[in-house]
């Protein structure tokens, strides 16, 4: 049976996902066959898998770090928030329904079987499985029925290394406090700790390492510096938007309103890396910039609710003014649906049944209905012939006169999206467009730019290698392997 090691954290956003990706790549570079695994994830940043389901975007990046196609079994339970208290529940890649938080807590025990089944499948394929926890094992009020942290680790008999984030402060208290809150058998399952996101001279924290080891009995496996290489990797989760602002300083202004239920916002990461682009993620309460060359409406997990949110911010008025000035507008997936004349949800797929007027910038209408479309796709942009690669992940169908001018023509012969008569407004369902160098170049040229020169896929690969090299230099990887072996 393959070895396994689980990285749990003292809290959310301590950097577990990146460390798992970097460790996976480091072990692959050592010649091992590696698989990532996350029992339960909560994210609206999802990816379509090679086996036709969906998982968290972070696990798709980790699969890439392992050099393998992604699988639904890498993240068997995915929760996609639709409201502040409810989420769509995806099990082994397929939607099984929606649940309020209290309802889901009662159902968690039922999902452990699926989680262990997926874990066994991953273990059968690999020399070692690197497992990522969710949140913190110190949330002992949620321990009953837990499948994300210690509940999984105990059920699967997997050793744990705890990750603390020194950048947010209080890392000593976080690690020692977690030790205090765990049960005795859970403390014994933790074999050591890692300090993440350190800035400055690591020797200055020698005393801190000693205090943690003395108070917990856990050895330290290393201090990881702030990994600047990570900025070239796809954004992991909505936490990354907490500090949203303008990235890049180029002359081309791209504005993206941050919707309340924004999804798959890593669509825009390739644009942010282009030297001639300034990408502004516009927060609630801020106007859309009047000098934007293009406004891009992102995907949404709750299109009608996010339409109301957009109007509450006054962004519909800003968009109308932008359009009058001759500015361009692009909608992706849920953003495409919003650009039409109407969005209807008669079955209550994304919330209460109902409908809402769209922004009226495209002559199309959308009816939300099943089944959910989950597929990888390739094709060309109709206006320029630029090749595109991406994936569809949506509910519903969009039709109308502007669909006679599709934005994309897919290789299977299907048309995707719509374009306004003057060509200034467009939308479609394909996520990941801007990861295609030729399409991104044509898009930037259409805004008056030079067209960019970034080789995005190579950039991601180089960043994963760089993170792996940094971890090899600052982490006792051999010690982690001994832990995984039970030694």
Image (cartoon, rainbow, N blue to C red):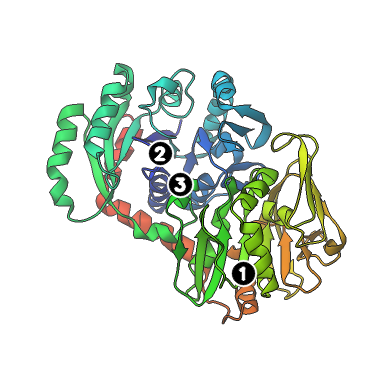
Q: Where is residue 241 in the image (x, y as percent from the top left)?
A: 47, 52
Q: Position of residue 89 (x, y in %)?
A: 62, 32
Residue with the mark numbered 3 = 239
Q: In this view, does 367 lie above or below 286?
A: above
- Say whether disc 3 or disc 1 marks the residue closer to the N-terminus: 3
Label 2, residues with CA under 10 Å away: few <14, some 14-19, many ≥20: some
Q: Which of marks 3 and 1 is in front?
A: 1
Picture quadrant of residue 191:
top left
Question: Do the residues bearing badges 3 and 2 touch, measured as CB atoms within 8 Å?
Answer: yes
Q: What element carries label 1?
A: strand
The answer to whether one can see residue 278 in this image is: yes
Residue at numbered disc 2: 12
- The residue pinned by badge 1 equals 294
Q: Nearer the viewer, residue 464 or 10?
A: 10
Quarter of the image with the C terminus is top left
Q: Residues within 10 Å of mark 1 (few under 14, many from 20)?
A: many
Q: In this view, does 437 lie to the left or right of 339?
A: left
What residue appears at the point 32 percent right and 25 percent down from the top-left corner?
189
Task: Note whether 387 is above or below 192 in the view shown.
Answer: below
The residues bearing labels 3 and 2 have C-alpha atoms spaced at a distance of 9 Å
Residue at coordinates 62% horizontally, 27% vertically from top-left? 99
Q: Which residue is drawn at 35% across and 27% down?
A: 138
Residue nearest the viewer, comparing 338 with 285: 285
Dot 2: element: loop
Label 2, label 1: how far apart the Cα atoms are: 33 Å
**Image spot of residue 351 (x, y percent):** 69, 35
Q: Which of marks 3 and 2 is nearer the N terminus?
A: 2
Q: Is residue 332 left or right of residue 464?
A: right
Q: Residue at x 18, y 51 (%)?
A: 202
Q: Mark 2 or mark 1: which comes first in sequence?
A: 2
């Amino acid at each position: 049976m393959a070895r396994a090691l689980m990285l749990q954290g003292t809290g959310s956003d301590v950097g577990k996902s990146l460390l798992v990706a970097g460790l996976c790549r480091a072990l692959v570079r050592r010649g091992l066959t590696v698989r990532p695994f996350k029992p339960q994830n909560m994210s609206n940043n999802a990816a379509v898998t090679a086996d036709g389901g969906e998982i968290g975007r972070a696990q798709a990046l980790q699969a890439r770090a392992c050099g393998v196609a992604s699988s639904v079994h890498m993240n068997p339970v995915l929760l996609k928030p639709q409201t502040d208290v409810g989420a769509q529940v995806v099990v082994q890649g397929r939607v099984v329904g929606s649940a309020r938080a209290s309802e889901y807590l009662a159902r968690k025990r039922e999902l452990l079987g699926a989680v262990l089944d997926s874990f066994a499948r991953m273990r059968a394929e690999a020399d070692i499985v690197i497992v990522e926890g969710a949140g913190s094992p110190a949330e002992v009020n949620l321990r009953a029925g837990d499948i994300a942290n210690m509940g999984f680790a105990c059920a699967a008999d997997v050793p744990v290394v705890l990750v603390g984030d020194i950048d947010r402060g209080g890392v000593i208290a976080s690690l020692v406090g977690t030790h205090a809150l765990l049960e005795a058998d859970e403390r014994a399952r933790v074999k050591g700790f890692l300090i993440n996101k350190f800035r400055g001279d690591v020797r200055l924290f020698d005393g801190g390492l000693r205090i943690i080891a003395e108070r917990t009995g856990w050895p330290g496996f290393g201090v990881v510096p702030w990994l600047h290489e990570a900025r070239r990797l796809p954004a992991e989760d909505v936490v990354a938007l907490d500090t949203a602002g303008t990235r890049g300083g180029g002359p081309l202004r791209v504005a993206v309103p941050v919707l309340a239920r924004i999804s798959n916002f890593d669509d825009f990461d390739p644009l942010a890396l282009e030297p001639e682009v300034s990408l502004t993620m516009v927060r609630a309460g801020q106007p859309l910039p009047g000098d934007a060359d293009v406004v891009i409406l992102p995907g949404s997990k709750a299109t009608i609710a996010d339409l109301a949110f957009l109007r509450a911010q006054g962004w519909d008025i800003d968009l109308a003014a932008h359009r009058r000035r001759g500015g361009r507008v692009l909608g992706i997936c849920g953003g495409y649906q919003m650009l039409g004349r109407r969005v209807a949800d008669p079955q209550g797929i994304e919330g209460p049944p109902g409908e809402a007027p769209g922004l009226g910038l495209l002559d199309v209408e959308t009816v939300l209905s099943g089944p959910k479309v989950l597929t990888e796709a390739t094709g060309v942009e109709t206006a320029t012939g630029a090749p595109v690669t991406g994936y569809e992940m949506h509910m519903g169908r969009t039709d109308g006169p502007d669909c006679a001018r599709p934005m994309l023509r897919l290789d299977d012969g299907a048309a995707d999206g719509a374009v306004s008569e003057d060509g200034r407004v467009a939308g479609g369902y394909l996520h990941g467009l801007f990861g295609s160098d030729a399409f991104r170049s044509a898009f930037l040229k259409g805004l008056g730019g030079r067209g960019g020169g970034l080789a995005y896929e190579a950039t991601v690969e180089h960043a994963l290698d760089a993170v792996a090299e940094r971890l090899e230099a600052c982490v006792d990887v051999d010690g982690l392997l001994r832990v995984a072996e039970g030694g």
